[in-house]
Amino acid sequence: MTDNPSDRDDNTSPQEDRQLTYEDVMQDYQSRWGGRLPSNPREIARYLREHGNVLPVATLKLRLAAISLWHQTHQFPDPARSAHVKSVLKEIEHMQQTVRGQARPLHVEQLEMVDSWLGQQIARESGSSKLPHLRNRALVLVGFWRGFRSDELTRLKVEKVTVDSGRSITIYIPRVDCDSANSSDMTFRTAALAKLCPVAAYEAWIAASGLTSGPAFRSIDRWGTIKDNALASGSITPLLRGILRSSGVADADAYSSHSLRQGFAIWARSNAWDEKMLAEYVGWKDRQSARRYLDTLDPVRVFRA
């Protein structure tokens, strides 16, 4: 297993934006980032900007609180309370909220919350009561790590998915812009991960559901009966919001199905993926789409303008 959904040879884990303790924050600020203590508003603002494209605002606020506490404890002027720092934090929050049609990116931190909650429900329930949670876990993890749109998730067919247990998943989705005479499938592949694994989640869902063909992600009624029809594309956003709300993610209504692709793009950029890599992985025909996407997601570029 790997910590990277593609087969790139690097050692970067998608868990890098986890919530840290007070001691961890101070060590990260000083040792890893190179910050000075005591600090000043200008340096704190730069610290926030450089992390604003990777970490959600809630995490940034926790880190800022730790830095603020250090200054108060050591009786230095608190740069975290400056108008400049507060303004930068508001700009980052606004940027994260307004990216791509008001939908908020789903960061890995929120993905961990979702996966943890769904795992608890799966462990607690029995029989057919597990099915919605197994389906939802597979849908969210596959959707995130493949950067899928809602229509791609709903068009996914069981017979068009190949699972190499513990190694990878390969998904074939028909192109919607091809004529029937020359139709072909788009191929999407992702590796198994040490955590938040889309391969294991999908495999568990298919094994429990017993599905062998047809739509992979289907409606399930209150009695646990799996329907023949696929989930409607328009149902993915309310479904995702319900999952986020139950998982304890704040402001669940600020997210949409597009938040999965946004969140993956942020993770990819923070792990040094360039436009070409992102375009090829997501399935865009040219790098321009990836460039526009990364420009929109990157608050640092906006601050430099």
Image (cartoon, rainbow, N blue to C red):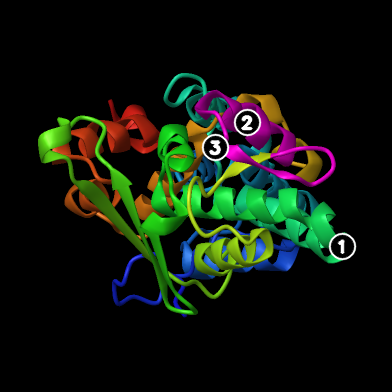
**For mark 2, what is the residue?**
82
Identified by mark 3, the residue type is Ala
Badge 2 element: loop
Residue 166 is tagged as none
- Secondary element at image label 1: loop
Tell me if residue 163 is in the magenta stretch. Answer: no
Q: Which amino acid is tagged 1?
A: Ser
Depth order, front residue of 236/39: 236
Given residues 54 and 21, the one toward you in this image is 54
Closer to the chain start, of discs 2 and 3, is 2
Circles 2 and 1: CB distance less than 8 Å?
no
Residue identified by numbered label 1: 126
Please tell me which residue lies in front, 49 or 234. 234
Q: Residue 35: give x, y in percent of width and height.
A: 50, 58
Q: Earlier in the sequence, mark 2 or mark 1?
A: 2
Badge 1: how crowded within 10 Å, few (<14), some, or many (20+)?
few
Identify the residue position indicated by label 3 in the image: 230
Label 2: few (<14), some or many (≥20) within 10 Å?
A: some
Question: How many angstroms separate mark 2 from mark 3 (CA)?
Answer: 52 Å
The image shows residue 108 at horizontal and vertical percentages of 56, 53
Of the numbered discs 3 and 1, the one sitting upstream in the chain is: 1
Q: Which residue lies most toward the left here? A: 182
Compared with 38, 261 (above or below) is: above
Residue found at x 81% / y 55%? 128
In this rendering, is residue 36 above or below 166? Answer: above
| Residue shown at 62% from the left, 44% from the top | 60
Please indicate whether residue 300 sits to the left or right of residue 230 in the image.
left
Q: Looking at the picture, how far across and down is residue 7, in whole percent?
A: 31, 72
- Quadrant placement of the C terminus: top left
Which span is picked out in magenta? 220-243
